[in-house]
Amino acid sequence: MFIHLDCNNFFVSCELVSRPELRGTPVVVANDNGNNGGIILALNQEAKSVGLKRGNPLFQVNKLIEKQHVTVIDVHHHLYHEVSHHIMEEVKDTEMVLDFVQYSVDEFFGMMPDDDPTRLRGYLQQLKDLIYEKTGIPVSCGAGTSYTLAKTATWFAKHYPAYKGICIMPADKREQALLKVPIADVWGVGRKSIKKLTQEGIQTALDYTQKSEAWVHRLFNVTGVRTWKELRGEPAITLASRERQKSVMYSRTFAHMTDSQTILLKELSNYATAATRRLREQGSICGAVTVFLATNRHRTDLAQYHVDETIKLTTATDDTRMIIEAVRTLLTRVYKPRYQYKQAGVILSQLQSNSGVQLDLFAPQAAEDTSRQKRLMRAIDTINERFGKNQIHFAVQGMENDTQDDPAGFMRPHNIE
């Protein structure tokens, strides 16, 4: 059967590993910039019980946070990716799961060559216990005859305490289970589709499966048909062939405004490095780089300036050095002194597979140079993965603890895709 593992309140759970004294108290993780300008990204059950929700702007719920003594922790994306990688390695080492893949930072899929519910529950309990023992992260587990049904089983594991974090959905229980699942909670059903489905009288996952394939295809094309088949127990999704992201963006709203071009270059170089690493992780190269800057639109007493500019690269690349050089060129073009900048970001676009790079006939770069670049980037990624973030980095990025030129509270980049 297909299995799905979902880490519970993942960002908060990662933080509580090193701060166990906060267990049992309301805790949220937010991209807080120090001035209540961020939003809540994750929260534990205790924080939910006092009325907080994911996506709440901090300034709107600040009084509630203070009244309920909620602990607000700044987001640490690198930590969460490290824990996620640790989980992957621990599960792989057991050799219990076939085709085990990471779907997102807190979700994993795989297969087990057994469809007996009792034995399967025992195996998933072993994985659940192992992950908690090795990482301190609680997980919920689901199993079904397709990826979508496995994820739906996890939905039951999370919503019904009686399952104790593990739900198996055998074929003979499928329809009974899908009758209880709102269509809005089905994996693969987007927000735009929910309104259309509701208008058609589709309220539950079971309602959806009882429509004809032709009807589904007419309204939702091949993507909707895949979800329809999966809910009927027919595997139709191949995770290995998921569509690559069409662009990668890293951005940050600064805790304090700055007019320093040096600081902006350092931060943008960090964003470019993180974005390019993401390119390599998904096997892509980019053909265009964009840099944007913005002042604080809420400070009407200050001069306003919002700008973005793009460079189209001669040769598509995943080489961090070339991306940083493009960022440096763009910053020189768009930077204007005496403005107080509040936000900056890097966008990599025109993405394509790295399986074949079209070289410029008139560029000095040769094929062997491209091969050398790839070996260098691979070596840097390997060293940083083994010894820690930015153990090897470019001088323009500055040191992780170098705050000599930074305004107080200047934040590190995070992915906002």
Image (cartoon, grey):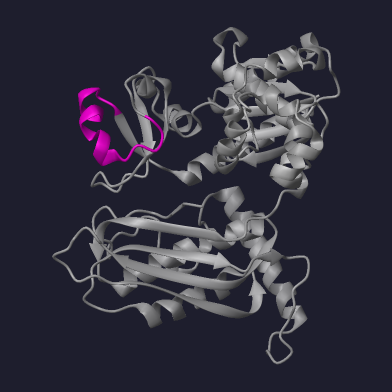
Q: Residue at x 56, y 43 (%)?
A: 192
Front residue of this view, candidates 155 and 379: 155
Residue 59 included in the magenta stretch of the image = yes
Front residue of this view, candidates 339 and 270: 339
Residue 298 included in the magenta stretch of the image = no
On the image, the x and y values in percent for residue 377 come to 64, 65
On the image, the x and y values in percent for residue 99 come to 79, 36
Q: Is residue 100 left or right of residue 71?
A: right
Q: Residue at x 81, y 26 (%)?
A: 233
Front residue of this view, candidates 170 and 358: 170
Is residue 180 in view?
yes
Of all residues, the one furthest to the right in this rendering is 113
Tell me where residue 20 sits by quadrant. Answer: top left
Q: Residue at x 70, y 59 (%)?
A: 283
**Position of 349 relative to 138 (above/below):** below
Front residue of this view, candidates 21 and 179: 179
On the image, the x and y values in percent for residue 223 come to 72, 44
In magenta, the rendered stretch is 53-70
Of all residues, the one furthest to the front in this rendering is 200
Q: Residue at x 80, y 39 (%)?
A: 214
**Position of 25 relative to 327 (above/below):** above
Is residue 169 in view?
no
Q: Is residue 169 left or right of residue 413?
A: right
How many labels sit on residues?
A: 0
**Position of 290 relative to 131 (above/below):** below
Of all residues, the one furthest to the bottom in this rendering is 362
Locate the N terminus and report the quarter of the image it occupies.
top right
Q: Is residue 72 left or right of residue 54?
A: left
On the image, the x and y values in percent for residue 249 come to 50, 59
